Amino acid sequence: MKHTKVIEVLQSDQLLQPVTIKGWVRSFRNDRFIAVNDGSTINNIQCVIEDNTINQEIVDRINIGAAIAVSGTLVESEGKGQRVEIQVSAIEIEGDANPEEVKKTILSPKRHSLEKLREQAHLRVRTNTFGAIMRLRSKLSYAVHDYFQKNDFHYVHTPIITGSDAEGAGEAFKVTNMDLNNIPKDENGNIDHSKDFFGRETNLTVSGQLEGETYAIGLGQIYTFGPTFRAENSNTSRHLAEFWMIEPEIAFCDLDGNMDLAEDFIKYVIQYVLDNCQDDLAFLENRLVQEDKQKPQAERSEMLLRDKLRFVLDNNFKRVSYTEAIEILKNSKPNKKKKFKYPIEEWGADLQSEHERYLVEKHFKCPVILFDYPANIKAFYMRLNEDGKTVRAMDILFPGIGEIVGGSQREERLEVLQEKMAALDIPEEDLWWYLDTRRFGTCTHSGFGLGFERLVLFVTGMSNIRDVIPYPRTPLSAEF
Amino acid sequence: MKHTKVIEVLQSDQLLQPVTIKGWVRSFRNDRFIAVNDGSTINNIQCVIEDNTINQEIVDRINIGAAIAVSGTLVESEGKGQRVEIQVSAIEIEGDANPEEVKKTILSPKRHSLEKLREQAHLRVRTNTFGAIMRLRSKLSYAVHDYFQKNDFHYVHTPIITGSDAEGAGEAFKVTNMDLNNIPKDENGNIDHSKDFFGRETNLTVSGQLEGETYAIGLGQIYTFGPTFRAENSNTSRHLAEFWMIEPEIAFCDLDGNMDLAEDFIKYVIQYVLDNCQDDLAFLENRLVQEDKQKPQAERSEMLLRDKLRFVLDNNFKRVSYTEAIEILKNSKPNKKKKFKYPIEEWGADLQSEHERYLVEKHFKCPVILFDYPANIKAFYMRLNEDGKTVRAMDILFPGIGEIVGGSQREERLEVLQEKMAALDIPEEDLWWYLDTRRFGTCTHSGFGLGFERLVLFVTGMSNIRDVIPYPRTPLSAEF
C-alpha cells in the first residue's frame, strides 16, 4: 500500500480514512503509544494500538530506532499535543533496532552532548535538533537560489580544482594523482608536475570570485554557490576546512549597490525561513531557552531566536566607514581600560573579532556594514579610492557570528590592478585571463562572498559551525 | 542614472520614455546602429545614433567588446528583427576594447571553432552560443532544486573531501597539505598520513551516495547536487575529471518508485526549460540546423532540438530488463554481421556504449531504462534479487548521450551487504558508519545519480561535454 508522509498526515482533514505511514520509532509508551517520525517534519505522528490488535511478537520489536510501517485509521486525538493520531490496524517491522545496541549510540533516549553527536554524525540527523538544523539548511539553500533566480542572476559553477593559487596565500589544499611514494622528479630533482593528472600543480579553490568575475563581465549578474576550502589550522567554532560559499558578482554595480544587494539578500532568506520553517524554528528557539536556563543570567540571550531573526528584518544594517569605526573603538571603554587583547592605537589596524563584536553587540546593537578599509589589509582586486589609501571593501558583521559577508567593488582599471599585483609579487602570467576582463570592455563591478554555514549558525542559533554541516571537515578530522 | 536590464527594455511598453542600458557592444554598423548585449538575454537592444548627436571622439570608441552606457528614448523600431529600439541621446564608454587586440581573441566577429573558444574559456561566455548554454545551465540547476524542494526532498551537502575510497576504485584524486618535497615518513619509511592536515589519507569524493543514504535514513527523502571527481584518464567528449552530480536518495522506496522518480524528475526539468528558456533554445536549435547543413544527409539530426525535448516529455521511457536487452542485442543485425566492436555472446556481458546506442537510437528510438543487471558488473551496495545473480540496478540511456542516470535499490539487509563486502575485500572498518544504517532501522530505499553535464548536453544539443561547463577539467588541462 502506498504510504503518506507524516507531514501530510498531520495536516490532513481526511478523518476516519485509512492511512499508512512509514518511519522510525521515536518512543513507545505503555505498549500502546508509538511516536513515529519520518523526517518530513519535526513532529511525530502518534500511533495508538488497541488491546490485542497487534501480535505480541511484533509489539516486542517496536523499539526506539526501528523502521516500521503503520496502517490504520486517522482519528481526532483525545490526548494533548496533537490534533490527529492513527488508530493502528496493522504494523510491519521494516528494520529492527536492537535495544542493547541502540543504548551504545546517540539514538538512545537521553541527553547527549553535541560533541558526542559529532562522533556519530551519521546518526545525529535522527535527533530532533539535527533534523531541524538540516531541514533549515536545506530550505535556506533553496531560498538562496530562489532569491538570485527571481532577480535574474545566473548560477555559475566555478571550478573546484584550480590551476592558480593567486588568492590562496598558501592556504589551499593540493590535489594530485601522483603516487606519493614515488613522486616524479625532473633532472634537477624538482617535482615534475607535468607528469601529474592535469600536467601542472593544482589546488582546491579558496574562492570562485575571479572566475565569477569573468562570467559577470558577459552574463551581467551571476552567483556561485559551492564548496570552498581552506587548509587553515584554525580549530575554532567558526572555521571549517570545507564550507559552502555564496558569491554573487554584478557588472555595472558599485559598492553602494553591492551593500544594498547583500542586505536585501540576507533579509530575503531570513524571511523565507520564518515563513516556511516555523516548526523547526520553534523547536530550536525552545532548545535555546532550555539551554539558557543552565547559564548564569549575564550569558543568556537577550532575544528569542525568532525575535532575533525578525530584528534583522526590521532594521537597516548600520553602514559605518572603517575610519569612523576606528574612532569609536579608540574612544571605547574597553580600549581605554585596556580590556582589548589588541588595543586600537591608530588608523590602519586590522580589526580583530573582539573589535567587531564590540561594534555590533555593544555599540550599535544591530548588523553593521563596515566599508572603505585600508588598502594594505585587504585583497589586491579591491578598488582603490581617490584618497589612495583605502579600498572599496565592505564586511557585514552579525551579532554572535562576526563577519558573515566580505565583499568589494573590484578594481576595474587595468593599470591600477597591474601595479597592485606587481607590488604584491603576483605574476601576471598566472592571471592573464583575469586581466583580460580589464582589457576588453572592463566596467564598474562588485560582488561579495557569504559563508553559508555562518548564515545557518545565525538562523539556527547553534554556536559551533561543526553542528550546521552534515559531515564537518576540520584539522585532524575527516571521518565518514 | 539607474539602468535597466536589456531583457526588460525589450519587453517594455513604456514607449517614448527615457531609458538607460549598460552592456557590451556586439556590433556597430554605419556609425549609427549599435547592438548592445548585457547577458540578461540572448537578444541585443538596437541603439540608434542620430546624425551629430554624439561626439565623434565617443563614436570612435564604440568598438566590438567595449562596455558602454547608453541613454535615450525607447521607440518603436522601424527596422526588422526588433519591436523596440533606443533613440540615443548620450553614450558613455565604461571600458574600451582595442580593435587590434580584440582581433586576436574570440571576441572578434567571425566564426571560431569550439576548440578555439575552449582555449579562451574566460571570454567565450560573451558569444551567443555560450551565453545561451550558460543561461540554460543556470535555469536547469534551478529546476533541479525546484523539483526536489516542491516534492519535500531535503538538500544535503555531502562532503567533498572524504576519508574513504570505498567507491573510488583507485580513481579518486588525493587531497593533501603535506610538503610534497618532504613527505613525512614513519620509522618504516611509509608515508605518515597522521602528519597530514586531516591526520589520515583523504580523497575527493566520487559520489555522495553513501553519506546521502545515512541522511535518507532519518530525513526520509534527500538529494545532493554538488561537484564530483574522477581521476580517470578518459579523453572523450563525454567525460570530465570534475563534474556536477545530482543524487536523490529515498527511504521506503523500491526500484519501481526509483524509476518513476527519475523519469518524472527529468521530464520536469525539461518542461521547465521549454517554458522558461525559449529564446536560448531557439538560438541553439537554429545553430544545430546551420551545423547540420555542413554535414552529409545521413549524419543530420532527425529532429529539431525542441522537438527532441518535447518527444521526451510525450513518451514513456521504455523499461527493459538487462536479460531482455541481451536477447535483443544478440539477435540484432550489427551483432550478427559482427559490426559491434564487442560482440554480444552471452548473458553477463557488460554493455558498451555501442550497445546502449543501438538499443536507444536504433531499436527503441526513445529513452530506455535498463534494470536488473548481473550482480558482478555492478556496485556492492545494490540489492540482490531473489535469483541470486541479478541486482536491482537501473540505468537510464538517452539518445546521443548514452547513460544519463545510474541508480539502484540499495541492499538494506545487513548480512547480505556484509557478505558482499567481504567477497570484494572492502574492509568493514572503512564503512562502519554505512553499515550502521543497516543496524538501526534499516529499510527499503533507493536512489540514483544523474550527471548534470550530460543533462545540459542533451538540452543544449551540444556534442562535447567541455562546452557545457564554464571551466572544464580534463587530463592535462586545468587552466583558469
Image (spheres, coloured by chain):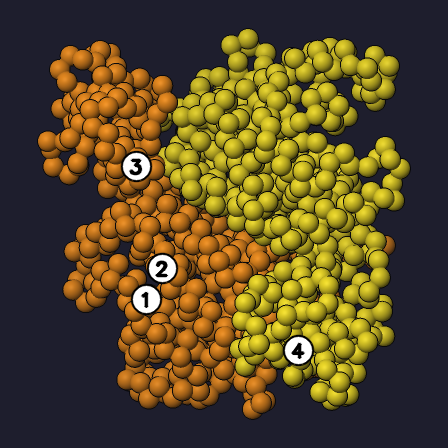
Chain colours: A yellow, B orange
Chain letter for the residue marked with disc 1 in the picture: B
Pointer 4 with pointer 2, Cβ within 8 A? no
Q: Residues within 10 Å of mark 3 (few under 14, many from 20)?
A: some
Pointer 4 with pointer 3, Cβ within 8 A? no
Inspect the image, locate mark 1, and give the three-letter code of the amino acid beneath it.
Leu
Classify mark 1: helix, strand or loop.
helix
Horizontal placement of A444 versus A80: left or right? left
Marks 2/3: CA distance?
22 Å
Q: In the rendered view, tell whether residue B68 sits above or below residue A218.
A: above
Query: Which residue carries the number 4 mark?
Result: A87
User: Residue B313: which numbered mark, if any?
Assistant: 1
Marks 1/2: CA distance?
8 Å
Chain letter for the residue marked with disc 2 in the picture: B
Pointer 1 with pointer 2, Cβ within 8 A? yes
Query: Which residue carries the number 2 mark?
Result: B270
Mark with earlier residue (2, 3) = 3
Q: In the rendered view, tell whether residue A333 sits above or below residue A264.
A: above
Mark with earlier residue (1, 2) = 2
Chain letter for the residue marked with disc 3 in the picture: B
Horizontal placement of A339 versus A228: left or right? right
Residue A298 placement (x, y as % from top left): 86, 32
Inspect the image, locate mark 2, and give the three-letter code of the amino acid beneath it.
Ile
Query: Which residue carries the number 3 mark?
Result: B7
**Residue at the spot x=67%, y=31% of the render?**
A398
